[in-house]
């Protein structure tokens, strides 16, 4: 039989008539086993399809059954039986080998791309699937060069707004700190700076699932609907959800400096990132205080700092490296 037809059969490219022809040949020619062992099938780079693999194994098993009947009627032919069994083992090993090589090749070729926004201006990134990501200041994303081949997955450090292209076969997954957010086609905001006490996810349109890497309150997944925000406290490993005005959360894309019910330490860190200065403070003393407010991103830093601190009667002093927050004066 034509070897080209065999190759088509093993790669699942035969039509119905060709498949029947090959299968008939295999059933009536046990010597095909010798060809398997001698023709160097292991050097093939084409994967045997699941359907063909199953058919071939069934044919080989039938050959064993037929051989067994002959054994009962005639002298035992150990060599023939072993050849067929060896072919089955070879087929199974061949499929496993292809699977290993495919995955190993992907691992070797996989590289991670990192995009940083170290400036004070907003950076927009167009992904290979046409999704768009807006990166806030001092934020970064990382994704594999295999992105959008079998999945859409990336890592976020900082804050970003995502406008995701719909693809139900390839969920869009963002890993940020202790949570991962999964979307199919939607828009949402994530704030997950490394040193902040709280990670926030706000859904603007569509629906997302937020998975928590650490189990708490007997819940590991939260489904968000538009206008809902989930906050994860890194220190206490707990979360809260609430409704929110999504416009206020995403104003930073319009060069606004926005604070939405933020812990004062996180608010001060945001100021430090925005103005590229060092702000020293006692985390424990301020961890119970919250701040809300909106400023122009170009507003003078000391004026903004005074406004934030004045609400709680706090002051600051200038240091060689930036500013130090002082306790309340009694």
Image (cartoon, rainbow, N blue to C red):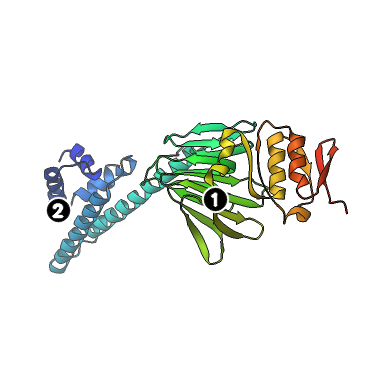
Quarter holding the C terminus is bottom right
Judge left or right: residue 55 versus residue 279: left
* Residue 284, horizontal then vertical, whole percent: 76, 55
The foreground one among 322 and 114 is 322
Residue 272: assigned label: none
Q: Position of residue 46 (x, y in %)?
A: 31, 40
Q: Residue at x 51, y 61 (%)?
A: 220
Q: In the visual, does 317 lie left or right of 105? A: right
The x and y percentages for residue 58 are: 21, 57
Asked if one can make out residue 104 in the rendered structure from this viewpoint, the answer is yes
Q: Nearer the viewer, residue 32 or 123?
A: 123
Q: Residue at x 49, y 40 (%)?
A: 162
* Foreground label between 2 and 1: 1
**Location of residue 268 (image quadrant):** top right
60 or 208: nearer the viewer: 208
**Residue bearing the label numbered 2:** 27
- Identity of the residue furthest to the bottom in this view: 72
Q: Residue at x 49, y 59 (%)?
A: 221
Q: Secondary structure at mark 1?
A: loop
Furthest residue in direction right, as rendered: 330
Please indicate whether residue 120 sits to the left or right of residue 206 in the image. Answer: right
Disc 1 designates what residue?
244
Q: Relative to 109, is 197 above or below?
A: below
Nearer to me, 87 or 176: 176
Q: CA distance from mark 2 to mark 1?
A: 69 Å
Expressed as whole percent of the image width and height from the top left, the position of residue 87 reads: 27, 53
Local crowd size for mark 2, using a 10 Å CA cut-off: few (<14), some (14–19), many (≥20): some
Mark 1: give few (<14), some (14-19) or many (20+) Cα within 10 Å: some
> How many numbered discs?
2
């Amino acid at each position: 039989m034509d070897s080209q037809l065999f190759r088509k059969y093993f790669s699942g490219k035969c039509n119905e008539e060709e498949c029947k022809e090959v299968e008939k040949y295999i059933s009536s020619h046990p010597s095909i086993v010798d060809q398997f062992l001698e023709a160097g099938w292991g050097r093939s780079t084409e994967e045997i399809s699941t359907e063909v693999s199953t058919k071939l194994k069934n044919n080989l098993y039938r050959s064993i059954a037929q051989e067994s009947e002959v054994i009962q009627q005639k002298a035992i032919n150990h060599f023939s039986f072993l050849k067929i069994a060896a072919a089955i083992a070879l087929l199974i090993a061949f499929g496993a080998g292809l699977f290993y090589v495919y995955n190993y090749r992907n691992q070797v070729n996989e590289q991670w791309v990192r995009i940083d926004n170290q400036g004070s201006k907003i950076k927009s990134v167009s992904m290979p699937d046409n999704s768009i990501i807006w990166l806030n200041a001092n934020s970064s994303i990382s994704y594999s060069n295999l992105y959008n081949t079998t999945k859409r997955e990336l890592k976020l450090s900082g804050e970003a707004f995502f406008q995701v292209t719909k693809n139900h076969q390839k969920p869009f997954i963002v890993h940020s700190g202790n949570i991962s957010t999964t979307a199919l086609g939607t828009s949402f905001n994530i704030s997950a700076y490394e040193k902040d006490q709280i990670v926030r996810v706000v859904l603007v349109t569509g629906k997302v699932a937020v998975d928590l890497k650490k189990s708490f309150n007997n819940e590991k997944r939260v489904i968000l609907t538009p206008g809902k925000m989930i906050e994860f406290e890194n220190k206490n490993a707990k979360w809260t959800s609430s409704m929110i005005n999504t416009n206020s959360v995403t104003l930073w894309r319009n060069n606004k400096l926005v604070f939405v019910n933020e812990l004062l330490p996180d608010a001060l860190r945001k100021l430090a990132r925005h103005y590229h200065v060092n702000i020293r403070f006692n985390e424990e003393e301020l961890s119970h205080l919250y701040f809300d407010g909106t400023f122009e991103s170009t507003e003078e830093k000391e004026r903004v700092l005074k406004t934030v601190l004045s609400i709680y009667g706090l002051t600051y002093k200038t240091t060689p490296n930036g500013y130090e927050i002082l306790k309340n004066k009694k």
